């Protein structure tokens, strides 16, 4: 009764058109709220991607001038680029894959330890995981070049101990690039893993043990499936940027370690071959999308709560 | 603190093939400086339904977790039959637990939850065993549901099926009904008792709900502050509490200060506010001085008009005045102020025979000498405990909200 009378006074107190207006306003609110984000996406994502796609189909201008291209629709650019740079493409995915697996192997126990065993040190350890971000990505990778360099103490010690032969270097090697990728992307793996492990109900682990699961079985049958969202998020956050990375290969690798990112960079800025650079960017993006799609289907995250 | 009834109850409950009794010998568990379980010795006979009853923080859950292997005792040993399982890892014990909030695996469906233990042990006919277990809890149609799709009561049954299907030697139940609403709780009490009788497994049930413990268990151990206050059959505990804690925690008690003045045959005579009361000799506390507390349950007391004649064989307290009478249909609860100011509680069942006593009526309290017990100690012990318990229930409920929502 009370509600009805309130409603009636509201209606009777307003002119006939009034009740409609707030409703229409309310319907528009979500779109208004979406507007800044959509505008941002359009200006900084949609437009550049269309431009880039256009560039990828260009051919050198007939004048032969360096850096001059004319807009054509030469889809053969893709076949050419894939053929010429398939080594670097495959290498990128292999490096990124190995680095992702290493990150997972290091990050999972680390995140588990922080979530369950760290006690009052938990927050400090989390800060330490993030701490590298306080220093520039490039600087840190350069530092690794120093650490692993000929004159670095690691190489000198290893040589003194005859662990590695006198002529061998640690930089400019596959190992160094993968180690650099692993080092640089470890926080991106650890943080989502931590978020998902931390939410794990320890009573479920107790239930697993109570139901005759030894620690390894409980890990396999309870802990890993329940933290799958964190594993998927962490591997994607590691794999995608690592596949497109060029800093590690440039600073820690040699000629034989060039990844697709390095090729794109040199095509754009050194050789001034915009169409090939754009084409490779698109190929990388498409390949990552396909891999991620297959991976998510396989991991079956939609089944998780 | 444990009385002579202990051995009686244990002896009676022990079956002929008592080879798999669960025995706790001088078990102590300390967390830092806090002693959660203090020197507990218990024998739980094979096939019995045993309840550990006590307020929150009394150490009952810790005791259970030590039996499950989820905590290791600081001192003492735990035996199952001949085997010493004190330090055995949980997955090596023939013991299963129904956890407080069920702890069903959210990523597995009901069937796989129930099959979990069977698969780990490489059981042969998993499908048949699981189906039987689901039949036992009357939910065979839910096998392919995920736990999140079940109501609280259904989850509770699945948790039970998941534990029972392994045919453990001992089944531990940690407040299994705590998150259910009252009606469902009553229903599950009957269900649990039925299943226990059907499968014949030793059930150790931890609860803070005295009614739950009394209706289901063969033997109840009342725990307080890490120790067992009293152990025995539910009726024995209720009728003959041996400590003030038990007298107050199990139901309500009127505890009146008195002095032992003499003996008369098999009765002790005490002086209670100048009036003599008789207490059967075997119910007098063994040690201590002459100061004691005389106890009687509220429903055992009869109210009589002030001019009523005494009847032989009963205890009487005269000079009481009714200060409050609340009628609830089935019974009336009276509050009677005694001459020395203490208030006694009296429950009068609505038999339609006796008179009603409105507020202000002078009355006599009378009860059978056989219903009198005497205790030494703090008359308030155990009364506060009920409040703590309510607090705990609230917390447990809020914790279980995401699971229990469906049930409500």
Image: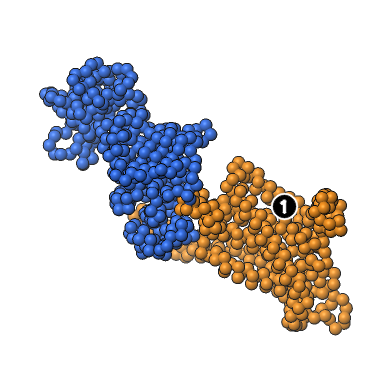
Chain colours: A orange, B blue
Looking at the image, residue A195 sits to the left or right of residue B105; the answer is right
Given residues A150 and A72, the one toward you in this image is A150
Q: Give the secondary structure at mark 1.
A: helix
Q: Nearer the viewer, residue B228 or B109?
A: B228
Residue B362 showing in the rendered view: no
Name the residue: 37% across, 63% down.
Answer: B128
- The residue positioned 65% from the left and 57% from the top of the image is A105
Question: Image quadrant of residue A275?
Answer: bottom right
Look at the picture and state if B127 lies above or below B200: below
Where's residue B40, x and y in %?
A: 41, 34
Percent position of residue B117, x then y: 45, 56
Left or right, residue B368 beside residue A83: left
Q: Chain of mark 1?
A: A
Q: Which residue is mark 1?
A: A133
Residue A284 seen from this side: yes
B51 left or right of A104 in image:
left
Q: Which quarter of the figure is the N terminus of chain B placed in? A: top left
Q: Residue at x 54, y 58 (%)?
A: A220
Q: Residue at x 60, y 41 (%)?
A: A120
Q: What x and y, as percent, mark residue B233?
A: 28, 38
- Image-quadrant location for residue B266: top left
| Residue B9, position as x, y percentages in the image | 29, 37
Within 10 Å of the Cα at label 1, are there few (<14), some (14-19), or many (20+) other Cα atoms? few
Count of numbered labels shown in the rendering:
1
């Amino acid at each position: 009764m009370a509600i009805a009378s309130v409603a009636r006074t509201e209606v009777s107190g307003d002119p006939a058109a009034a009740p409609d207006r707030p409703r229409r306003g309310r319907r528009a609110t979500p779109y208004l709220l979406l507007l800044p984000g959509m505008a941002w996406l359009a200006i900084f994502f949609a437009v550049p991607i269309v431009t880039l796609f256009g560039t990828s189909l260009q051919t050198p201008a007939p004048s032969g001038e360096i850096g001059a291209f004319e807009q054509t629709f030469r889809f053969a650019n893709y076949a050419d680029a894939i053929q010429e740079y398939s080594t670097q493409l495959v290498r990128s995915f292999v490096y990124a894959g190995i680095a992702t697996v290493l990150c997972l192997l290091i990050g999972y126990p680390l995140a588990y330890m922080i979530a369950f065993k760290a006690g009052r040190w938990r927050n400090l350890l989390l800060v330490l995981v993030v701490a590298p971000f306080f220093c520039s990505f490039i600087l840190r990778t350069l530092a690794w070049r120093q650490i692993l360099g000929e004159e670095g103490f690691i190489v000198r010690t290893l040589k003194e101990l005859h662990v590695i032969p006198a002529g061998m270097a640690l930089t400019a090697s596959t190992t160094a690039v993968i180690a650099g990728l692993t080092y640089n992307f470890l926080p991106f793996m650890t943080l989502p893993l931590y978020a998902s492990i931390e939410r794990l109900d320890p009573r479920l682990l107790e239930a697993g043990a109570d139901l005759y699961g030894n620690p390894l079985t409980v890990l396999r049958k309870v802990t890993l499936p329940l933290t799958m969202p964190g594993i998927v998020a962490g591997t994607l956050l590691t794999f995608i940027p690592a596949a497109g990375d060029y800093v590690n290969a440039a600073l820690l690798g040699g000629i034989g370690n060039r990844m697709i990112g390095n090729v794109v960079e040199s095509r754009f800025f050194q050789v001034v071959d915009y169409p090939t650079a754009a084409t490779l960017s698109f190929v990388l993006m498409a390949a990552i999308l396909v891999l991620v799609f297959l991976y998510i289907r396989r991991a079956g995250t939609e089944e998780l709560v | 603190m444990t009385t002579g009834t202990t051995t009686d109850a244990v002896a009676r409950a022990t079956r002929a093939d008592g080879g798999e009794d669960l025995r706790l010998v001088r078990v102590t568990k300390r967390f830092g400086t806090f002693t959660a379980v203090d020197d507990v010795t218990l024998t739980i006979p094979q096939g019995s339904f045993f309840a550990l009853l006590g307020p929150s923080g009394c150490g009952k859950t810790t005791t259970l977790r030590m039996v499950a292997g989820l905590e290791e005792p600081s001192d003492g040993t735990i035996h199952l039959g001949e085997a010493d399982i004190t330090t055995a890892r949980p997955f090596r014990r023939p013991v299963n637990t129904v956890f407080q909030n069920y702890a069903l695996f959210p990523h597995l469906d009901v069937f796989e939850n129930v099959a979990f233990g069977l698969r780990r042990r490489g059981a042969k006919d998993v499908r048949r065993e699981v189906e039987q277990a689901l039949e036992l809890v009357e939910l065979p149609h839910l096998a392919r549901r995920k736990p999140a799709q079940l109501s609280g009561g259904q989850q509770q049954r699945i948790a039970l099926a998941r534990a029972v299907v392994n045919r453990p030697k001992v089944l531990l139940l940690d407040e299994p009904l705590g998150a259910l609403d009252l009606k469902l709780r009553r229903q599950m009490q009957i269900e649990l008792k039925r299943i226990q009788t059907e499968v014949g497994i030793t059930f150790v049930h931890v609860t803070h709900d005295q009614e739950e413990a009394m209706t289901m268990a063969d033997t109840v151990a009342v725990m307080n502050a890490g120790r067992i206050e009293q152990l025995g059959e539910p009726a024995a505990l209720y009728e003959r509490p041996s400590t003030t804690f038990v007298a107050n925690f199990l139901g309500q008690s009127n505890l009146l200060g008195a002095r032992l003045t003499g003996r008369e045959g098999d009765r002790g005579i005490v002086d209670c506010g100048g009036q003599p009361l008789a207490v059967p000799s075997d119910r007098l506390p063994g040690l201590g001085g002459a100061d004691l507390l005389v106890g009687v349950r509220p429903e055992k007391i009869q109210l009589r008009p002030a001019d009523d004649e005494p009847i032989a064989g009963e205890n009487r307290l005269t000079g009481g005045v009714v200060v409050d009478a609340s009628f609830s249909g089935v019974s009336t609860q009276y509050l009677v102020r005694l001459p020395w100011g203490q208030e006694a509680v009296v429950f009068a069942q609505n038999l339609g025979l006796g008179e009603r006593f409105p507020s202000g009526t002078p009355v006599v309290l009378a009860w059978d000498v056989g219903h009198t017990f005497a205790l030494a100690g703090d008359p308030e012990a155990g009364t506060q405990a009920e409040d703590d318990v309510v607090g705990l229930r609230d917390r447990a409920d809020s914790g279980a909200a995401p699971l229990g929502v469906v049930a409500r």
